[in-house]
Every structure is written in C-alpha cells, then in structure tokens.
Image (tube, helix red, strand yellow):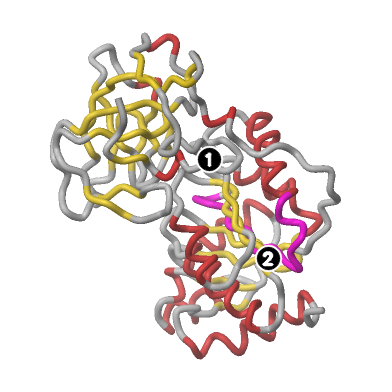
Amino acid sequence: MTADVHASVTRIADLKGSAYAVESRPNDEWERGDYVLARVTRRPGPDVQLENPTGRRVELMEGETLVGALGTRRATRGFVGGWRDVGEDGHFHVMTGGGVLGRVTSASPFGPTPIDIKYEGHVIRDGSAVRMSDCGLAPAAVARDTPVVLVLGTSMSAGKTMSGRVITRVLVENGYDVGACKLTGAGTYGDVLSMEVAGADPIYDFVDAGLPTTVVPEPTFREAIGPVLDRMQRADVIVAEVGASPLEPYNGAAVVDMIESEVEFTALCASDPYAVVGIESAFGCSPDVVAGIATNTTAGVDLVEELADCSALNLQSESAKEPLEAMLIDALGTSV
C-alpha cells in the first residue's frame, strides 16, 4: 500500500521513492518517530493543510491516506497530545502541518480543528518498522566554533520565524554566508525553508536529526541535535531558532546551554512586553534586541524599552533594517 500524501517529516527517509509494506502493529510496540500510514476519516476545513516532503502545503480529502510520524506535542496555543494517548480503536490526529501524529487531548479554542485519522499500519522496509531516528544525521568530527545569532521566544507564535528570516536577509546582504537551523519545536518544514528563501545555505532542523518534535528526554535531544550543529559549521554565521519558549518542555534550555559559548547576538521574540521581563528574570540576562508580536506597534516598542534593559525593533518594518544591521555588525564584525 502506498500513501496519497507523504508528510514533510518523511523527507529524511525517502519513502516516496522506495518500496515499502504496511503492517498493523499493537500499541505496545509503537515508538516515537515510527512512520505510520493513516486514513483521513473526516474532511478537514479548507484552512487545514499538510506539508509534503518539499514543504508544499496540500489539502487532504476524506478517505485519502497519509504517512506521518508518531510524536508528542505540548503547544501552549495549539494542540497537546501524543502517540501514547492513542487508544486501541486507532483513532488519532494530525498534530502539526509537518505530519506529526498522535491523539489530541487538549486544544486551543482559537486554533484549527485537528485532522481526524485512523491507523492503518506501520511502514515496513526490509522487515523492520521505519523510524525517524534510523534516518537522522550522523555526527561529524568538526569544531563547533561558528558564531551564532540566537532567535528565541517567550511562547510559540511570537514571531521567531519571521524575525529569523529578516535577520538572515540582513546578514546575507552584508556578505555573510549564513547557515540557518531550527533546533527545537514540533515538526514542520516551512520555518527553515523561509530562511532558505532569505539566502541561508545550509538549512537544517531537528527533523534532520530524526526527531518528530523535541518533546523528548534531554539526553536523547542532546545526542540527536549534535549532528545538526556539526553540519552548520561551514557557514560564516548561524541563525539558530529555538521553537516555542526555552521554559517549555521542548528542550529549549538544553540547546541554549549547548550553544551558549558561540552565541554573539540574541533576538527575543515576545508575545507581549511583560513576557520580556519574565524571560529576563528566568535567565538573569537581557537579549540584544526584542522583536516579534510585542513590537507590532510603537506603543509596544515603547513599553518594552520602558520595562526591559534592551532595545526593541519591529522587524516587519523596513525602517528597522538599518538599526538591526548596525547591531548585528557590531556583534559579529564585518564579513570576511
């Protein structure tokens, strides 16, 4: 059996280009990152789409099948749930646009309705279940000393990806070879692709490391994400996005610890000005600039700068380009 749609989390496994079987397996044999085939049992709304392996968003129809990966999500403004919550009836949901699959146990009333699916079976190749961790990057023997521009947030949907794209564009326009990565969050491809559009090369994320989301034990996360950092070292500078908030269970604090010695500039994307104060209090330091939703208006910018010991810029405005450029060059020096 083949799927109508292969979700973007399958891009590291080349499933669309190879033969595989589908075999039903009991729940107690399921593991994080397993690729499974499921059937859409109810047509989703027109605004709910799924990424394919190239990042293109496609609509799903009732009765179509898809291949995604079992994972766990803990979104403050989206879905909460995971593969361990799936019952014996095999009914569960598509929890991210990238095809992370699990049963939703809590959902924001302001978000879309999850796509209802039913388990058909595990993807089997050469007699074994195909799992993301078997397809992830291998470590490389390189020194991790490339300077990092860190983009983190006070919550999900705070403006991190947009800010990373603007920062990437400014750096590329100033002659830097920029590598971009998303190191924590829930699997979608569009975030790092948006930084590729801005000129980043290479681009990687935790899906390349073999993780559907980064809601995993910290040792597992550190081991998996190391090879992603290895691949970034050929760039002049790395723009690294930390999905969600470093205080949420996505291992954001762990990755900040892993790259702390290389971070030369930090952009904090805030959902509101008071959240900036919370992050400053939690980590005992201030970012180099605050961006994101909190800076959408001059009132927000003014309040951030009144409450926090840092500058604020609305990076959606072209007028922010010049001061951002000056800050980045001051932190990184001119490109070689």
Q: Residue at x 76, y 54 (%)?
A: 260
User: Relative to residue 286, is residue 232 depicted above or below?
Assistant: above
User: Relative to residue 168, is residue 23 depicted above or below?
Assistant: above
Q: Which residue is mark 2?
A: 149
Q: Amino acid at mark 1?
A: Ile
Q: Residue at x 69, y 81 (%)?
A: 327
Of 228 and 157, nearer the camera is 228
Q: Which element carries disc 2, helix, strand or loop? A: strand
Mark toward the start of the polypeptide (2 vs 1):
1
Res 287 → quadrant: bottom right
The magenta span reads 231-245
Q: How many marks?
A: 2
* Res. 274 visible in picture: no
Q: Which residue is mark 1?
A: 12
- Indicate left or right for 306 with 76 as reference: right
Q: Residue at x 56, y 62 (%)?
A: 277
Q: Residues within 10 Å of mark 2 (few under 14, many from 20)?
A: many
Instruction: Point out residue 210 in the picture as x, y percentages from the top left corner.
Output: 57, 35
Quadrant placement of the N terminus:
top left
Q: Is residue 234 magenta?
A: yes
Q: Amino acid at mark 2?
A: Val
Instruction: Point out residue 177 in the picture as x, y percentages from the top left corner.
Output: 70, 71
Q: Give the Cα distance between marks 2 and 1.
A: 26 Å
Quadrant placement of the C terminus:
bottom right
Residue 194 has which mark? Answer: none
Q: Residue at x 53, y 73 (%)?
A: 198
Q: Nearer the viewer, mark 2 or mark 1?
A: 1
Instruction: Point out residue 272 in the picture as x, y percentages from the top left corner.
Output: 44, 65
